[in-house]
Image (cartoon, rainbow, N blue to C red):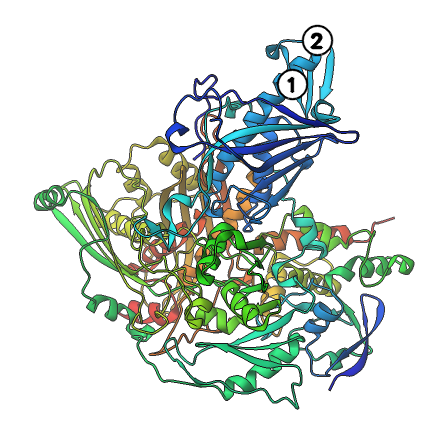
């Protein structure tokens, strides 16, 4: 969250610009960081401690009025490259077009932090800019000979009493320094005894954090934040100028294709050989169970790998339950006490004892995949002196750096990660794990040459981590008026924090851990304050197939993790509870919350969707026959300072089990909207992704391996299946910005399931709503 | 063994050394350094690698380079030249790597509508749009959905969910490409 603005704050340390030198041409102000010791971090520092050392430049403001901004966060396709520019421009009173961003590279950015933490990253840059702004004002006041209070700034030009000077002119001919106090640390490998998340020190996920509270511009005065600034990276992507991670070419580089084990647990008996007559420059390289074909020519590697794979022998392994038995297998598992629990057992037991009526419902979802359009790809150059450079795309470059160092048994200063664009990963690189980097590093180490590893689609769908399947039980206690007085939910799932790189696992190198904080985590933000009595429990288990030498199906977070699943369970139950009381589902929700922000977005979204107020199921509901039946359904959610409502309208043909979503209306109130247009893009895209999950997506597997390994077997939404999407945005000038880009996918499945119930009178207890599930469900 | 193969890419004649069965994608990306088309699936199932061959969309990941010798190959890098030539300005159709050219209306529409999120699939999406608009100058929403979903060999897939923006951009490009009434 972005902290609240304060006009005056005693904990605003007096940072001053110092002059390093005069220069003949150009000139610049370098805004870098000074690490505060933990003891002094919260105190009202008048000056950074004398022992502090500068870390690196964060902002460079140059005499030509251009600005270079560095951030360890990366663009993951949601428009953050634009949002960061807007936030900096706002505080500095400049145009965002004057800003160039360097993102992610570990040798050129120093603050670290994961890209899922956009709000904390924005808060950092906002404060850095606010410090810089104050320092520039002081400089200008001196230069113009007027008091600081008399100054106004517009588009980087400071004015007072008829005098004007630009930021560029202020720094002309000088090298100036400004040091900003920071605390925290970049991502690092968790030492023994330190709380870890996916093997990383939990304390470093957000990277360095700017200390102190410089005066921030009030949200109500924003001019740049709140406008639809175009995403700066788009033109180059459209013309073909962008350098993607798959485009990196180094002198002497080898192309690699991997030969993966026959199953998720098969170990190598013998690797096949390359037919040198047919593929003269290709070679097989292996370490442990990591097998690859390398060649200076990419196509030769691709062509050769098929025959090598055919002749590579693996042991048999079968340790998976088969996807058709997943629910049964999860039900049969002996779950221990909850990993995380919220609420009071005794209170809930008492409430249930007083209930007039109770609902007891169970829901389930299979494994789903992040499924980017571009499979993993990475280039690594491991030098004989131990220097390692990796070119890739990651949502957490510093974490990846720490992970590679851990794998190699070296220190992070030996490893550089360069971040480039790639297909959207939707959370699977949040811990800097899952990816082709480890493969590339191992192969570069073995061959002594730079190596580019391109995973195939089949490999990616079979071997990348997945968002685990789950089961859940939820109970609701209703009073005589049909109001919920208590809720008890229990969510059961394999852990979703296994970011161990496949290459490290197969090569038998240190890969990290599957334990640690967040193995099973409660992710709901409770929207119903009138249901005061609740017990929420999350149970976690190891990966399915964990007995495999490679650890089975690695479970990893995916867009809106945990809350996507757990909110589905809550909202599905709310829809069934509303129907039990014969109350309109929107009305039922409003009866259980006093939150005005939630009510406002629900009302606005219902209006935009032309919602017809009535209980579900629809009077025309029908569960049989070839006649199409129509239904509507709703879902709400609160996440990261944002209030959401989604409304689905669908058509079901009971005889065929075909479900078509005809319209989806998504509303959000997320405080001050940073960029309405980019938010709309993220909202519409999230709806498309959520519809895939609601209607189609399921990772299938047999007793040893994943079987949904291409786009005909792992089905995502196509353009023709996309319904009309209506968007409602409520921006607040009196609220800080909340999270808007991530969550939309999570609003869809529960609303679609509710619409299915409305249309047919039958409540689904599983997604996706495929004909194979829906057909038998309707037949009862 | 590698053959010397000649093909015309973005208006320029090129001779490449490749085995005939090498998919066009690898020749474009690795030999000609045209990185607009991208590897998505290698199975002609997603569209990320799509290019135009004699104006018709093909999936370069499964098209042998030998199949396009003597034909005109166009990648997104060549769309400005294609548009210049279509406007009767062949002298502006500078080959291979254009420097200063007006963008193809489809590219401009992709920028104006802010279509790409991650953008990985969008090169193929723009190629599909150019082919669609060549066949249907003013497609309806349903016709656009049909073209991007049901044209063989597979739907054009986008995981970020930019389909709505693509529809808007195709219609914007159609308006921009419409002959001005005199």
Residue A422 left/right relative to A323: right
Identify which residue, A611 or A295, lies in the foreground.
A295
Q: Which is closer to the viewer, label 1 or label 2?
A: 1
Q: Where in the figure is residue A701, as x and y percent of width and height?
A: 37, 75
**Residue B118 seen in the figure:** yes
Quadrant in the picture for the C terminus of chain A: bottom left
Residue corresponding to mark 1: A139
Who's the residue at 63% across and 60% down the image? B144
Give the chain letter at badge 2.
A
The mark nearer the N terminus, 1 or 2, is 1
**Residue A632 seen in the figure:** no
The image shows residue A656, relative to residue A381, as above or below, that is: below
Q: Residues within 10 Å of mark 1 (few under 14, many from 20)?
A: some
The image shows residue A91, relative to residue A85, as above or below, that is: above
Q: Where in the figure is residue A776, as x and y percent of width and height?
A: 30, 71
Quadrant in the picture for the N terminus of chain A: top left
Residue contact at pointers 1 and 2, CB within 8 angstroms: no
Q: Secondary structure at mark 2?
A: loop
Residue corresponding to mark 2: A161
Residue A631 left/right relative to A520: right
Who's the residue at 44% across and 29% down the image? A3
Q: Where in the figure is residue A337, as x and y percent of width and height?
A: 18, 55
């Amino acid at each position: 969250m972005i902290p609240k603005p304060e006009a005056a704050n005693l904990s605003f340390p007096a940072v001053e610009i110092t002059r390093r030198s005069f220069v003949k041409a150009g000139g610049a102000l370098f805004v870098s960081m000074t690490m505060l010791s933990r003891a002094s971090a919260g105190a009202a520092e008048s000056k950074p401690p004398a022992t502090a050392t500068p870390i690196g430049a964060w902002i460079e403001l140059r005499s030509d009025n251009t600005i270079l901004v560095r951030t360890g966060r990366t663009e993951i396709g949601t428009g953050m490259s634009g949002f960061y520019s807007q936030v900096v421009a706002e505080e500095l009173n400049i145009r965002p077009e004057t800003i160039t961003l360097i993102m992610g590279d570990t040798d050129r950015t120093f603050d670290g932090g994961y890209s899922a933490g956009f709000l904390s990253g924005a808060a950092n840059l906002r404060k850095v800019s606010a410090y810089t702004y104050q320092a520039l004002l002081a400089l200008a006041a001196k230069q113009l000979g007027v008091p600081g209070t008399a100054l106004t700034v517009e588009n980087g030009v400071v004015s007072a009493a008829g005098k004007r000077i630009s930021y560029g002119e202020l720094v002309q001919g000088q090298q100036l320094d400004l040091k900003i106090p920071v605390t925290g640390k970049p991502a690092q490998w968790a030492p023994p005894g330190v709380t870890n998340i996916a093997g990383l020190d939990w304390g470093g996920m957000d990277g360095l954090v700017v200390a102190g509270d410089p005066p921030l511009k009030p949200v109500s005065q924003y001019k740049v934040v709140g406008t639809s600034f175009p995403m700066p990276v788009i033109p180059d992507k459209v013309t073909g100028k962008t350098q993607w991670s798959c485009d990196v070419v180094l002198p002497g580089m080898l192309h690699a294709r991997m030969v993966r084990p026959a199953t998720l647990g098969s170990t190598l008996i013998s690797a096949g050989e390359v037919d040198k007559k047919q593929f003269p420059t290709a070679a097989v390289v292996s370490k442990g169970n990591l097998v690859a074909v390398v060649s200076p020519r990419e196509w030769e590697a691709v062509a050769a790998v098929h025959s090598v794979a055919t002749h590579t022998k693996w042991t048999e392994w079968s340790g998976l339950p088969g996807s058709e038995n997943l629910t049964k297998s999860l039900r049969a598992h002996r779950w221990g006490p909850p990993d995380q629990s919220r609420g009071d057992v005794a209170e809930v037991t008492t409430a249930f004892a007083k209930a007039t009526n109770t609902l007891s419902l169970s829901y389930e979802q299979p494994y789903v995949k992040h499924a980017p359009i571009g499979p993993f790809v990475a280039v690594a150059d491991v030098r004989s002196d131990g220097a390692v450079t990796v070119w890739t795309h990651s949502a957490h470059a510093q974490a990846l750096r720490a992970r590679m160092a851990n794998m190699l048994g070296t220190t992070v200063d030996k490893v550089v990660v360069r971040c480039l664009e790639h297909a959207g990963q939707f959370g699977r690189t949040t811990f800097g794990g899952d990816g082709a980097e480890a493969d590339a590093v191992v192969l570069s180490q073995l061959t002594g040459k730079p190596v580019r590893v391109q995973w195939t689609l089949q490999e990616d769908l079979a071997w990348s981590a997945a968002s685990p399947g789950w089961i859940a039980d939820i109970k609701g206690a209703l009073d005589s008026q049909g109001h919920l007085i208590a809720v008890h939910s229990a969510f059961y799932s394999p852990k979703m924090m296994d970011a161990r790189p496949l290459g490290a696992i197969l090569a038998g190198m240190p890969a990290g851990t599957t334990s640690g904080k967040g193995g099973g985590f409660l992710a709901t933000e409770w929207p119903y304050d009138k249901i005061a009595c609740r017990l929420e429990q999350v149970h976690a288990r190891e990966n399915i197939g964990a007995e495999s030498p490679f650890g089975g199906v690695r479970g990893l977070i995916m867009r809106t993790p945990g809350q996507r699943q757990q909110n589905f369970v809550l909202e599905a139950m709310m829809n069934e509870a509303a129907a039990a009381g014969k109350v309109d589902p929107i009305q039922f929700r409003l009866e259980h919350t006093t939150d005005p922000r939630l009510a406002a977005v629900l009302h606005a979204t219902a209006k935009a969707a032309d919602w017809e107020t009535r209980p579900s199921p629809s009077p025309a509901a029908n569960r049989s026959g070839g006649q199409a039946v129509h239904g509507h359904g709703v879902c709400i959610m609160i996440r990261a300072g944002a209030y959401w409502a989604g409304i689905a309208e669908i058509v079901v043909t009971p005889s065929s089990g075909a479900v078509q979503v005809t319209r989806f209306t998504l509303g959000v109130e997320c405080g001050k909207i940073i960029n309405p247009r980019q938010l709309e893009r993220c909202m519409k895209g999230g709806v498309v992704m959520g519809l895939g999950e609601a209607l189609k997506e399921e990772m299938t597997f047999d007793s040893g391996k994943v079987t949904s390994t291409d786009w005909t077997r792992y089905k995502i939404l196509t353009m023709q299946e996309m319904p009309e999407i209506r968007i409602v945005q409520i921006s607040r000038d009196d609220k800080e910005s909340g999270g808007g880009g991530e969550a939309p996918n999570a609003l869809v499945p529960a609303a679609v399931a509710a619409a299915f119930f409305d249309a047919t009178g039958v409540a689904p207890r599983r997604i996706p709503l495929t004909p194979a599930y829906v057909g038998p469900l309707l037949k009862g | 063994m590698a053959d010397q193969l000649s093909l015309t890419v973005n208006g320029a004649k090129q001779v490449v050394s490749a085995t005939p069965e090498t998919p066009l994608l690898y020749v474009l990306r690795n030999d000609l350094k045209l990185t607009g088309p991208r590897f998505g699936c290698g199975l002609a199932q997603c569209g990320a690698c799509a290019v135009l061959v004699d104006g018709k969309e093909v999936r370069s990941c499964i098209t042998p380079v030998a199949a396009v010798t003597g034909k005109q190959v166009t990648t997104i890098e060549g769309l400005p030249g294609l548009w210049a030539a279509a406007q009767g300005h062949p002298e502006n159709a500078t080959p291979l790597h254009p420097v200063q050219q007006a963008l193809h209306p489809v590219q401009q529409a992709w920028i104006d509508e802010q279509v790409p999120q991650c953008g990985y699939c969008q090169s193929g999406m723009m190629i599909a749009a150019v082919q669609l608009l060549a066949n249907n100058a003013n497609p309806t929403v349903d016709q656009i959905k049909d073209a991007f979903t049901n044209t063989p060999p597979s739907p054009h897939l986008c995981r970020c969910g930019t389909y709505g923006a693509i529809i808007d951009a195709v219609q914007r490009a159609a308006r921009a490409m419409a002959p001005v009434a005199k």
